[in-house]
């Protein structure tokens, strides 16, 4: 899922300075699962903001709503009335939702981000999410024993490990596992170490973010 | 703050906390009357939002009382509650409210005197912090 | 001949080679380069120039190498893939060879988190092994990466890479070296060696694969300055292990500088005995003035004149 973290309150508050009627919009998908922007988090943020404004004796109206998700027009449209009534929308979705609500609602609607979108990751355990995919557009997991060196190697090496790999950890942080050590261990388990003797050629980065904004189109379902 | 009478929301678990309150009541132990009581089956039921809402709505403090760690009827409910209290404090600090306005205490079974002590301690603490900066 | 450079000639002749290292200045003070270079002149066969090592911004390797060429010294241009994509890399190789640079050392590079511009985005378009392949393609096929674009002129370079016998996974290090050999590397410089036993074990595995015959291995040595330095390096520098016996000698020494030189000379003598070691890479970083006495005491003078 997409993993994000809510911004610090003072940053959010600074963004909201010019507005009197705020609609906080949560999202029921990824940000709910990683506890950054779901219904609960909307409630918590709304409560904090109300306390803040009460303390400052400011009359600010705060509405709350949580959409099933903010990346499909069908789920945004039922809330357009509510959206048009507010001065500003504070979206707790990932960067996609923040932008798409704006696209669907129209250019006069101001949508601000309350969440910092971080990465595609998995939920390792209660309260821990870790990055696993870089969205490079050309998956090579079949060649790397199911461990992605683009997302999990700090240098994106395809012929790793580098000389900084020590004790199975990456040179950048002793808490970060060396992806190539993981790949090595797994291939060793499978008796396939010889796969590592082949040189992996240079990567084609065209399908990645580097190549420019991307689109996927399915002609068979286009109207 | 001589005449400040704090408004404190007290969230008590059904097992140890209420048992202790019962004993305190029967023994007619004296303790300050400022607590607005909310009963939960287990402190594990308490959500961060409950704590925030109480303060948002004008409480000066929130007191949570549950069984001792290791003695929770539902095993780890109180452990989870302690973690949520820590988190709630962080959220309150972000708003500029004192985290100490939220306190969680363990009470070892039906000890009336301990119950009374906790109530007294909490009331004194909130009195010293003064009324909530949010105003009424 | 791949490069017509002195380093290549000396190694091909079967002579024991000595390379040194020079860190460019954190600015454009050419005098710093001149001073360091003069200590090395006549004491080493070629001089490595680091490329923004540990991600600290210094004068570019290519510019510094060009200055060394002007001073009639032979540089080994280190190039990392952290800061340049394949376009800039190949472009710099055109420029480097045009400026008379004959040796290149292909590296991935330390992560930018270690440096003085930690907020920078990194590149890592290609890795060190792909870089070796790229240079080999340019030199031997006369085309850019991809084989389509013909190069105007001839690229002549002696291709080097680094090897770390002390990094993990240990058993894999020789496989990685073999990969570099497969990619087309001509010579290897290792990380500085203090743990002689582990290095000997690594060399044994290297010889087992016959790699010492395909690739010239230069063993890395760095003289220690003090007990403090020994302790610091053992603890903080990734990829370096120092046996307690050596740390002990440095800590107890009455003249640590002399002891450091002594240990370094002993190491060189031991390394010369190991089959497959074709030279040493002497890294006296910010201590270039010690190089003449180390090389002299190790019996490596005079350096052969490459003809």
Image: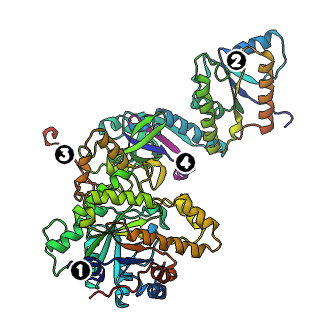
Q: What residue is shown with label 3? A: A217
Q: CA distance from mark 4 to mark 3?
A: 37 Å
Question: Residue C108 location, x and y as percent?
Answer: 35, 63
Q: Which mark is residue B17?
A: 2
Is residue C33 depicted above or below C270 in this figure?
below
Q: Which mark is residue A8?
A: 4
Left or right: where does residue B53 sit relative to residue C129?
right
State whether discs 2 and 1 lie on one chain. Answer: no
In the image as oriented, which residue stretches furthest toward the front? Answer: C273
Q: Nearer the viewer, mark 1 or mark 3?
A: 1
Kindly state the secondary structure of the residue where label 3 is placed: loop
Left or right: where does residue C264 sit relative to residue B122?
left
Examine the rendering and report whether any part of residue A209 can be seen: no
Q: Which mark is residue C3?
A: 1
Q: Residues within 10 Å of mark 1 (few under 14, many from 20)?
A: some
Task: Judge by depth and name the residue closer to the eye, C199 or C191.
Answer: C199
Q: CA distance from mark 1 to mark 3?
A: 51 Å
At 84% from the left and 18% from the top, the residue drawn is B30
Task: Judge by depth and name the residue closer to the eye, A2 or C39.
Answer: C39
Contact check, label 2 and label 3, Cβ < 8 Å: no
Question: Residue C237 location, x and y as percent?
Answer: 50, 61
Q: Which region of the structure is painted magenta?
A: A13-29
Q: CA distance from mark 2 to mark 1?
A: 85 Å
């Amino acid at each position: 899922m997409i993993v994000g973290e809510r911004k610090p309150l003072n940053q959010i508050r600074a963004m909201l300075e010019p507005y009197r009627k705020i609609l906080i919009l949560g999202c029921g998908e990824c940000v709910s699962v990683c506890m950054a922007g779901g219904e609960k988090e909307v409630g918590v943020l709304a409560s904090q903001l109300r306390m803040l404004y009460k303390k400052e004796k400011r009359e600010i109206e705060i509405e709350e709503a949580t959409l099933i998700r903010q990346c499909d027009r069908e789920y945004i449209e039922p809330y357009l009335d509510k959206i048009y009534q507010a001065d500003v929308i504070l979206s707790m979705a990932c960067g996609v939702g923040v932008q798409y609500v704006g696209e669907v609602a129209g250019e006069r609607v101001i949508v601000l981000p309350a969440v910092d979108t971080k990465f595609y990751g998995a939920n390792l355990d209660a309260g821990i999410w870790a990055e696993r995919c870089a969205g490079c557009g050309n998956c090579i997991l079949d060649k790397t024993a199911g461990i992605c060196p683009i997302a999990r190697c700090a240098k994106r090496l395809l012929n790793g490990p580098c000389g900084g790999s020590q004790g199975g950890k990456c040179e950048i942080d002793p808490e970060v596992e060396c992806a190539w050590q993981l790949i090595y261990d797994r291939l060793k388990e499978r008796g396939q170490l010889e796969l590592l003797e082949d040189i992996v050629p240079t990567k084609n980065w065209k399908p990645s973010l580097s190549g420019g904004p991307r689109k996927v189109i399915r002609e068979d379902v286009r109207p | 703050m001589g005449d400040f009478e704090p408004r404190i929301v007290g969230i008590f678990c059904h097992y140890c906390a209420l048992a202790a309150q019962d004993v305190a009541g029967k023994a007619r132990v004296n303790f300050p009357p400022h607590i607005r009581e909310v009963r939960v089956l287990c402190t594990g039921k308490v959500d961060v939002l409950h704590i925030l809402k109480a303060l948002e709505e004008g409480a000066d403090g929130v007191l949570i009382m549950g069984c001792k760690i290791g003695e929770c009827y539902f095993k780890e409910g109180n452990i989870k509650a302690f973690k949520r209290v820590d988190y709630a404090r962080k959220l309150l600090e972000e708003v500029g409210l004192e985290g100490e306005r939220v306190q969680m205490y363990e009470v070892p079974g039906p000890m009336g005197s301990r119950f009374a002590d906790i109530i007294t301690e909490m009331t004194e603490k909130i009195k010293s912090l003064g009324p909530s900066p949010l105003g009424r | 001949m791949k490069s017509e450079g002195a380093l290549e000639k000396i190694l091909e002749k079967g002579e024991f080679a000595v390379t040194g290292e020079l860190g460019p200045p954190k600015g454009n003070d050419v005098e710093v380069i001149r001073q360091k270079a003069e200590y090395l002149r006549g004491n080493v066969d070629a001089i490595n120039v680091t490329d923004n090592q540990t991600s600290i911004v210094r004068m570019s390797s290519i510019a510094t190498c060009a200055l060394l060429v002007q001073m009639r010294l032979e540089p080994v241009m280190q190039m990392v893939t952290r800061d340049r994509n394949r376009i800039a890399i190949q472009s710099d190789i055109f420029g480097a060879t045009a400026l008379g640079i004959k040796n290149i050392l292909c590296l991935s590079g330390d992560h930018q988190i270690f440096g003085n511009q930690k907020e920078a985005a990194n590149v890592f378009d290609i890795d060190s092994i792909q870089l070796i392949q790229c240079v080999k393609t340019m030199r031997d096929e006369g085309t850019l990466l991809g084989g389509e674009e013909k190069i105007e002129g001839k690229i002549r370079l002696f291709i080097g890479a680094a090897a770390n016998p002390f990094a993990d996974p240990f058993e894999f290090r020789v496989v990685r070296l073999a990969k570099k050999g497969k990619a087309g590397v001509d010579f290897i410089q290792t990380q500085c060696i203090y743990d002689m036993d582990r290095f000997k074990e690594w060399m044994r595995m290297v010889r087992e694969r016959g790699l010492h015959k395909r690739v010239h291995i230069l063993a890395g040595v760095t003289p220690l300055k003090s007990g403090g330095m020994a302790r610091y390096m053992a603890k903080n520098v990734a990829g370096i292990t120092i046996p307690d016996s050596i740390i002990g000698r440095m800590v107890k020494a009455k003249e640590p500088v002399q002891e450091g030189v002594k240990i370094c000379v002993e190491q060189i003598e031991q390394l010369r005995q190991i089959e497959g070691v074709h030279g040493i890479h002497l890294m006296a970083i910010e201590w270039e003035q010690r190089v003449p006495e180390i090389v002299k005491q190790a019996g490596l003078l005079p350096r052969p004149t490459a003809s």
